[in-house]
Amino acid sequence: MTRYSAFAIAREAFRDHLGWRRAWASPEPRAAYDVVVIGAGGHGLATAYYLARNHGITDVAVLEKGWLGGGNTGRNTTIIRSNYLQDPSAAIYEKARSLYETLSQELNYNIMFSPRGVMMLAQTEHEVRGYRRTAAANALQGVETEWIGPERVKALCPIINIHGPRYPVLGALWQPRGGTARHDAVAWGYARACSRMGIHIIQNCAVTAIRSRDGVVTGVETTRGAIACRKLAIVVAGHSGVLAGMAGFRLPIESTALQALVSEPVKPCMDVVVMANTVHGYMSQSDKGEMVIGGGADGRNDYSQRGSFHHVEETVRALIETFPILSRLKMLRWWGGIVDMTGDRSPILSKTPLGNCFVNCGWGTGGFKAIPGSGWAMAELVARGEPGPLAAPFSMTRFREGRFIDESVAAGVAH
Amino acid sequence: MLLLTCPYCGIAAEETELAPGGAAHLTRAGPEASDAAFDAYLFLRDNPKGPHLERWRHAMGCGKWFLAARDTVTHEVYGTYPAQTREPPAEVVARIRARHPGWSWRSAG
Ligand SMILES: Cc1cc2nc3c(=O)[nH]c(=O)nc-3n(C[C@H](O)[C@H](O)[C@H](O)COP(=O)(O)OP(=O)(O)OC[C@H]3O[C@@H](n4cnc5c(N)ncnc54)[C@H](O)[C@@H]3O)c2cc1C
Ligand SMILES: [Zn+2]
């Protein structure tokens, strides 16, 4: 496989760019694998990648019902941050964020990580107290964040109206090394690296049943035939409940729609990410110049991949007060994804009631930022059969045991 | 916009008038129940892709809770009925089965 480099571009320029090869192979599925990963989103691909890289396990297939990265990984607003409140969250999200810093070099694929800084606005007294507390927690966790006042907010992001009549900006939680990355490139980069190490990525291959014997998984039925495996990792986000049903257990998860939209491209006007959780809106500007806007999740169960109109209307209405410049922009595209919500708004990386079957889900509205750390922790869980320190707190039994990792209050909306 | 008819006041309420309340017909675990029963009541959900029996409150109307059978893929509404109902009415089940032959209602949780 060709290494991507400035030299490779120059070489190809001299031969009409005819030398570029496909970034990953499309093999026929084999009858059996050591490990089968269901779902070729960022988390499934990263799981496969770290299985090979950290544990030397390459007899792995990643099965995807559609196209790789076509789920939430290709639908999110790409915010990366690690300023969570609870210690287990800070550990796994900061692991992910720090892996993102060098991921382009490691994968030899430009994922366009842009640590431009993320600010979470405080627009109520309650949020001021909440974010000051988070800043203190982050200091203890070794996550670099800072509480900043309204003038600093205005200096960092001049298009903000800090004197809004309904929701004045009272300050913000600022993470200077948070930012964004190109979501598709994260999936593509991991897929290419997996393929290079001999892992099979099999697209257009939906899992339709899970086979087991004596309480231990033996394989899956798919639209491309039966595939046996010794270990199974279910990494399907919004469809986790469906796959858990096939495996014979239930999860503390409900699926709802979360939506986003982008404006027509405009000249650069905002070089940080801003999240306004009270009004359920967040925004950044893409490299193409579009304003990328996300809103709140719907409250009802949903698999339709389309959000409700009134939610997006609320988001835009509220953002216009904080960013008056938006009021004259046309919106170009609008889409939804199906997010897997847990009660404490934290993910699940866990063994399951079915032997040798593991789940990674519950990232809900905020798992893009976690992809490298989640894949790292999940690979460890699958390879050893027991969770390492990053995954252990996120077991699915934590609900029954009352060990919630509550990010729903302090983090407002998560993304 | 999703419209659900409130079985109490008969109004075809728009979604913005309503507050969603999650899965319906849960078995409420009491103080004597096992940890597993509490887990099932409080946290574990069927989360089906297809017909879903769910709770709604007519928040901006009469304020009462009612139940609805709605398809989570198509948003088709198979019917609404009062919250004081232990299982979905026969006509609602029939309407669901017309679309999903063999559909059965799981009362596990
Ligand atoms: C609108 C929106 C905005 C968001 N914004 C942010 C943000 O700013 N920052 C952030 O950190 N996170 C954000 N998120 C959340 C983030 O996108 C997700 O948490 C993350 O992408 C989940 O990745 P995944 O790999 O687990 O799931 P996915 O990318 O959804 O991958 C799961 C895959 O499983 C496949 N699958 C399902 N069923 C089967 C089957 N039976 N057989 C085979 N394959 C199957 C699906 O086709 C899919 O490709 C946002 C999400 C949405 C929808
Ligand atoms: Zn009513």
Image (cartoon, coloured by chain):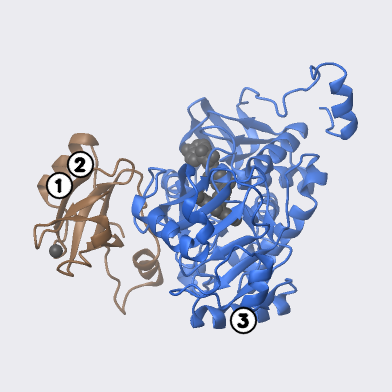
What amino acid is labelled 1 in the image? Val
Image depth: mark 3 or mark 1 in front: 3
Tag 3 and tag 2, C-beta contact below 8 Å: no
Q: Which residue is mark 3?
A: A132
Q: Residue at x 83, y 28 (%)?
A: A2
What amino acid is labelled 3 in the image? Arg
Along the horizontal axis of the image, is A304 left or right of A120?
left
Identify by letter the chain in brown.
B
Alpha carbon of mark 3 to alpha carbon of mark 2: how far? 50 Å
Residue A289 rendering spot, x and y as whole percentages: 63, 46
Subunit of mark 2? Answer: B
Q: Is residue A233 visible?
A: no
Viewer-side residue, A337 vs A62: A337
Q: Colour of chain A?
A: blue
Q: Residue at x 58, y 45 (%)?
A: A73
On screen, A88 above or below A295? below
Residue A124 rendering spot, x and y as whole percentages: 49, 78
Residue A331 rendering spot, x and y as whole percentages: 48, 45
Q: Quadrant of the C terminus of chain B?
A: bottom left
Label 3, residues with CA under 10 Å away: few <14, some 14-19, many ≥20: some
Tag 1 and tag 2, C-beta contact below 8 Å: yes
Query: What element does badge 3 sit on?
Result: helix
Alpha carbon of mark 3 to alpha carbon of mark 1: how far? 51 Å
Residue A36 rendering spot, x and y as whole percentages: 61, 39
Q: Which residue is mark 2?
A: B96
Q: Is residue A145 visible?
A: yes
Q: Which residue is mark 1?
A: B92
